[in-house]
Image: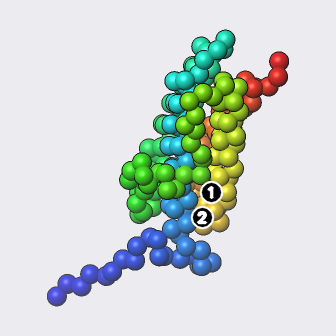
């Protein structure tokens, strides 16, 4: 007779300090939702930017959107490596995202950049909190990935800040 030990799902396992190990994949999934929201907003502004700096802003936003989208697969795969489920639909994203949408018909280019600056700063702050959680729970692999994402978010914010700085 073969017996199968039941493996407790990751979301219920606790470490020695009582912290739920599911906190990391849950937080990563929330970050993933915010990354998709930021990606779509960045593409929205890329498509709709106008004015005398059109070409520069259009290219800047396209490059930033590409960088954001490239991060999403790594985030989702990290969640899966931790044994959890992640984003399944646009509706799922909308329920989890903290980054606001912008559906306005007209947004001034300066306002677009300032909004994306704030969004990227918020992402960096969210990532720093997640990094602390990973450190506390000994998840070195997630922490290492997050360090790169923090640098990228801060880099995007820096470019946006310089673009909106008064001349």
Query: Extreme right residue here?
Result: 167
Q: Is residue 66 above or below residue 18?
A: above
Q: Is residue 83 above or below residue 53?
A: below
Q: Is residue 109 above or below residue 34?
A: above
Q: In the image, which is nearer the foreground, mark 1 or mark 2?
A: 1
38 or 52: nearer the viewer: 52
146 or 102: nearer the viewer: 102
Task: For residue 124, say whether it is visible.
Answer: no
Find the distance from the CA under tag 1 to the CA under tag 2: 12 Å
Task: For residue 23, say whether it is visible.
Answer: yes
Circle 2 is placed at which residue position? 138
Residue at the (61%, 60%) spot, across then down: 134
Q: Position of residue 14 (x, y in %)?
A: 53, 77
Residue 166 in the figure: left or right of residue 134: right
Q: Position of residue 51 (x, y in %)?
A: 64, 14
Residue at the (60%, 67%) spot, across then down: 137
Circle 1 is placed at which residue position? 130
Checking the image for residue 58, the label placed there is: none
The number of numbered badges drawn on the structure is 2
Query: Extreme left residue here?
Result: 1
Q: Quadrant of residue 142?
A: bottom right
Q: Position of residue 81 (x, y in %)?
A: 42, 57
Q: Quadrant of residue 150?
A: top right
Q: Is residue 110 above or below residue 68?
A: above
Residue at the (31%, 82%) spot, across then down: 5
Q: Tell whether label 2 touches label 1 (CB within 8 Å).
A: no
Mark 1 or 2, nearer chain start? 1
């Amino acid at each position: 007779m073969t017996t199968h030990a039941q493996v407790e799902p990751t979301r219920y396992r606790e470490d020695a300090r009582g912290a739920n190990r599911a906190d990391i994949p849950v937080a990563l999934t929330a970050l993933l939702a915010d990354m998709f929201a930021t990606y779509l907003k960045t593409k929205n502004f890329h498509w709709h930017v106008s004015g005398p700096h059109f070409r520069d802003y259009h290219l800047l936003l396209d490059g930033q959107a590409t960088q954001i989208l490239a991060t999403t697969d790594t985030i989702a795969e990290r969640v899966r490596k931790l044994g959890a489920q992640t984003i399944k639909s646009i509706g799922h994203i909308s329920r989890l995202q903290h980054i606001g949408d912008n559906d306005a018909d007209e947004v001034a280019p300066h306002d677009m950049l300032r909004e994306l600056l704030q969004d990227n700063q918020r992402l960096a702050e969210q990532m720093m909190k997640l990094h602390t959680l990973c450190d506390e729970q000994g998840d070195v692999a997630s922490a290492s990935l997050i360090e790169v994402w923090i640098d990228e978010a801060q880099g995007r914010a820096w470019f946006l800040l310089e673009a909106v700085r008064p001349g």
